[in-house]
Amino acid sequence: MKGIAHCSMTKMNYAVPICEGGITMIDLRRLTLEQIRAFVAVAEHQSFTNAARSRMRTQTALTRQIRSMEDALGERLLKRSRGHVEGLTDAGQRLLPFALKILATVDDAWTSLQRPSVSGRIRVGIMDDIDVGWLNELVSRFRASHPDCDVRAVSDFSARLERRLENREIDIAIVKQLAPADAAPSEGVLRREALVWAAGPGFRSDPDRLLPLVVFHEGCAYRRHLLESLEAKGIRSQVVYEGQSYANVLAAVRAGFGITALAESQVEAGGLLRLQRLGDVDLAELGTVEIVLRQAAGRSNAALKAFARAIELHMPEGAASAVSGFSPSVSQFIGRPAPGGQSLVL
């Protein structure tokens, strides 16, 4: 069989030859795009940890996707040694070009439907205090596939992006906010997951000393929230490292400067450990992180709607949203001003 027999946005219906001569065929009908994207990410990064980070998932969730894919195909796709990826098996090497073609075809199909009628200006704000490599790639692809759109991006902390939206310096932004764990999802939510305590693999707390904290800059709600949570538990602490970016905070925690609070998927993907107790003291629950699409009041055009749709299609599936069964649609919120609420903007 040559080329593409059939493609849908959720399930793939391909038959890919694995053996020379096309005698043995692997049926891909049961695979999802997320599984294929996970396989390609591992093949490109040669690492579960880095692939999980690029897909904005936990390493456990990504590993589970690969194993379910291998079980469905009846073939091992990766060479593993003590949990590490040493390369692709023969089956994996033969499957990879087809997987890349499948993803490219889906992207091209979406682009061909959007390109004819999309033009306009988009000024995008991208939060700087979380690992969003996928979003930077999306902006780059969107610019390339929509030449009539003038897309410009700025990176900043979520709170500052909110102010830029209010001042109409940007048109649309992806920001994060805190919300109670039992609260209903806010409008425009792309993803929800738990905010948890995290520490480096070698971290040890000393009950006779102040608990060392690694935090973002002054004014960040993460910082205020975790300080208030520790105070409520009677745990004395001090800030020993202030970072201006997600990468800096992650590096400091890995190095053992202290503990911090991160979205659950970032903990394992960043090579950190989730911390639930300090000696005999249970650490306080920190609530839920929401990644939210915001736009400036009164801004709505075809370009903004197309960009929101692109985010819907390419946003990595989050473990928390998958568990809750929440399947957001954000393009419907384009054209509305940013909603108010009780959530804390980070």
Image (spheres, rainbow, N blue to C red):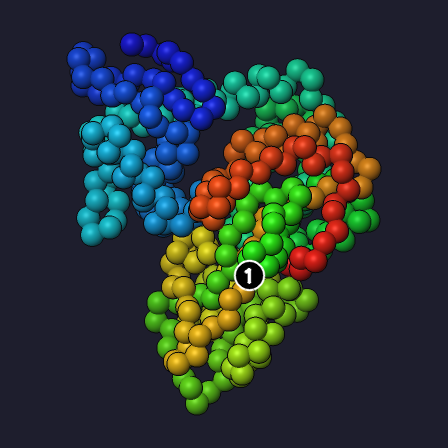
Residue 80 placement, left or right of 63: left
Identify whether 275 is placed above or below 39.
below
SS type, badge 1: loop
Identify the residue under disc 1.
287
Identified by mark 1, the residue type is: Gly
Identify whether 131 is placed above or below 40.
below
In which image quadrant can residue 103 be found?
top left
Residue at 37% x, 77% y: name it: 204
Can you give x and y, in whole percent of width and height, for residue 288 in the image? 55, 57
Residue at 44% x, 75% y: name it: 282
Residue at 34% x, 17% y: name it: 14
In this orientation, does residue 67 appear? yes
Can you give x and y, in whole percent of width and height, for residue 83 in the image? 24, 50
Can you give x and y, in whole percent of width and height, for residue 254 in the image? 41, 65
Mark 1 burial class by Cα count in 10 Å: few <14, some 14-19, many 20+: some
Q: Which quarter of the rendered picture does the C terminus lie within? A: bottom right
In which image quadrant can residue 239 be found?
bottom right
Q: Which quarter of the rendered picture does the N terminus lie within? A: top left
Can you give x and y, in whole percent of width and height, for residue 196 in the image? 48, 63
In this orientation, does residue 127 appear? no
Which residue appears farthest toward the bottom when viewing the image?
A: 208
